[in-house]
Image (cartoon, rainbow, N blue to C red):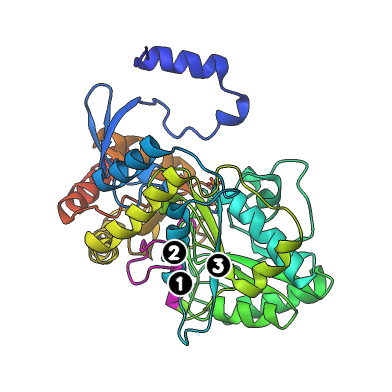
């Protein structure tokens, strides 16, 4: 039997969880969750919360969405697992359906899929594919990037809090084109950051690169949008040096940005490799690398096999997610509800001076707290206080950004306009309370 009490759960975690699992616990005073349905969570005391974190962006179409759960259960009962060594139609269908979501303006791109178990494994594989295909070792990544916990994914993750000793190298970091606090100043656009990519290739690599990894909207970086022209310009510069554009769509993908299925589409660029995870399975462990057939081709010379990649239970869930995205008009909802929430956040900024910036698109939004609007000194203390206070109003938020001074909102994409009122009112109360 399961002991559901907070006290015993905390005790077991203290006794049996490794230290590596202890830091990333957001609340000072945690709760035990018993149930989720769509955009809501309930704790063991039956308190209801709006999950603005989407259980870390995994819940794309809603907690325990009945259609996704039914699809996975039906498959699990038939055959829970079948690896890619053997033939099974569910992952094969899913690969076809995923490929069809990719841009293909002239119909001449043959998109192919390699399923993995997690986003970081997909990142890892994308690094291997890029290096293998181009024959170059050096990679570029952004300073506030987060790409995952495997040693390889850590090596292209810029935020120091996520970097541990023992990572492989051959990575050069470029400045984030952050339009609020970037090194070239507010609203500097893409150009100075593209020049910086060129300088970095010239001075911090061998001159030939395997590729650049870009999150079209940085997640853990604090919802940093890539300015217009940045991904396109980065692709041009990197391709000129033999490399590829690799889009990490782990957080921004599956319609979350509202306007498009994929975040990179906002820039009209077509990446060479796309990494996806989290929302792909609505909570079922699943991820994928999608690339052009010719880029994946050299991998045929060696073995590359992920035991649970293409697991049919997870892929059945993934197929249902794609269907629900269409049926529930999830992307459109992300656009409309995200816009309403963004407007409310802008109004909060006018009222509460701790808010230095409000940004994002669709249901990928953040507010950033500063101690001073001129110096933009990050304010992680106020961020934490608002975060804890919001919880009293039933809001689960997420602290993020290189300085933990942003509150990130990446809820299940079924968030409603009524929820937006509760979120804005709850945040308003939280800011007012901490000032009293
Ligand atoms: N890329 C991005 C942008 C992410 O946010 C994450 C997970 N937070 C990953 C990669 C790694 O995914 P996973 O945790 O599934 O390994």
Q: Quadrant of the C terminus?
A: top left
Is residue 429 rendered to the left or right of residue 32? left
Q: Secondary structure at mark 3?
A: strand
Label 3 crowd bin: few (<14), some (14–19), many (20+), radius 10 Å: many
When asked about the image quadrant of residue 348, the answer is bottom left
Q: Would you say the residues marked 3 and 1 are in contact, meaning their CB atoms lie under 8 Å apart? A: no
| Magenta stretch secondary structure, dominant | loop
- Disc ID at residue 202: none
Residue annotated with mark 2: 98
Query: Camera-side residue: 64 or 69?
Result: 69
Q: Quadrant of the N terminus?
A: top left
Query: Camera-side residue: 249 or 272?
Result: 272
Nearer the observer, disc 3 or disc 1?
3
The mark that comes first in sequence, 3 or 2, is 2
Answer above or below: position of 72 versus 182: above
Residue annotated with mark 3: 112
Looking at the image, which residue is at 49% across and 61% down? 249
Residue 171 at x, y percent in the picture: 75, 60
Instruction: Residue at the far right: name it.
Output: 206
Q: CA distance from mark 3 to mark 2?
A: 9 Å
Say whether residue 198 is magenta.
no
The mark that comes first in sequence, 3 or 1, is 1
Q: Which residues are magenta?
A: 250-266
Looking at the image, which residue is at 58% across and 53% down? 146
Label 1 crowd bin: few (<14), some (14–19), many (20+), radius 10 Å: some
Q: Would you say the residues marked 3 and 2 are in contact, meaning their CB atoms lie under 8 Å apart? A: no
Label 2 crowd bin: few (<14), some (14–19), many (20+), radius 10 Å: some
Residue annotated with mark 1: 102
Instruction: Residue at the far left: name it.
Output: 418
Residue 373 at x, y percent in the picture: 44, 60
- Residue 254 at least partly seen: yes
């Amino acid at each position: 039997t399961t002991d559901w009490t907070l006290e015993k759960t905390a005790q077991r975690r203290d006794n049996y969880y490794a230290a590596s699992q202890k830091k990333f616990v957001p609340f000072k005073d945690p709760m035990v969750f018993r149930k989720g349905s769509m955009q809501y969570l309930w704790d063991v005391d039956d308190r209801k919360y709006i999950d603005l974190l989407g259980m870390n962006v995994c819940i794309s179409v809603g907690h325990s969405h009945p259609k996704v759960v039914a699809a996975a259960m039906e498959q699990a009962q038939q055959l829970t697992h079948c690896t890619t060594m053997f033939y099974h139609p569910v992952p094969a269908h899913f690969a076809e359906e995923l490929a069809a979501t990719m841009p293909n303006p002239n119909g001449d791109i043959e998109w192919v899929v390699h399923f993995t178990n997690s986003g970081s494994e997909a990142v890892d594989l994308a690094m291997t594919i890029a290096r293998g295909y181009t024959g170059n070792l050096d990679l570029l990544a952004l300073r506030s990037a987060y790409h995952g916990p495997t040693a390889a994914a850590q090596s292209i993750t810029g935020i120091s809090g996520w970097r541990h000793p023992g990572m492989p190298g051959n990575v050069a970091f470029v400045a984030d084109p952050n339009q609020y606090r970037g090194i070239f100043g507010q609203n500097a656009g893409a150009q100075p950051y593209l020049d910086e990519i060129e300088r970095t290739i010239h001075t911090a690599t061998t001159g030939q690169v395997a590729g650049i990894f870009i999150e079209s909207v940085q997640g853990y970086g604090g919802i940093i949008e890539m300015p217009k022209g940045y991904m396109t310009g980065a692709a041009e510069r990197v391709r000129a040096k033999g490399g590829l554009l690799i889009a990490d769509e782990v957080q921004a993908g599956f319609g979350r940005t509202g306007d498009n299925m994929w975040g990179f589409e906002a820039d009209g660029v077509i990446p060479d490799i796309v990494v996806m995870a989290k929302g792909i399975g609505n909570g079922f462990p699943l991820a994928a690398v999608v690339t052009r057939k010719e880029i994946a081709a050299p991998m045929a010379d060696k073995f590359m096999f992920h035991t649970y990649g293409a697991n049919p239970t997870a892929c059945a869930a993934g197929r249902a997610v794609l269907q629900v995205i269409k049926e529930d008009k999830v992307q459109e909802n992300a656009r409309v509800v995200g816009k309403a929430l963004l407007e409310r956040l802008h109004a909060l900024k006018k009222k509460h001076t701790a808010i230095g910036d409000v940004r994002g698109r669709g249901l990928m939004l953040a507010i950033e707290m500063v101690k001073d609007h001129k110096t933009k000194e990050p304010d992680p203390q106020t961020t934490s206080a608002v975060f804890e206070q919001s919880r009293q109003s039933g809001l689960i938020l997420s602290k993020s950004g290189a300085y933990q001074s942003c509150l990130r909102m990446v809820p299940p994409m079924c968030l409603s306009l009524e929820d937006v009122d509760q979120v804005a009112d709850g945040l308003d109360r939280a800011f007012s309370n901490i000032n009293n």
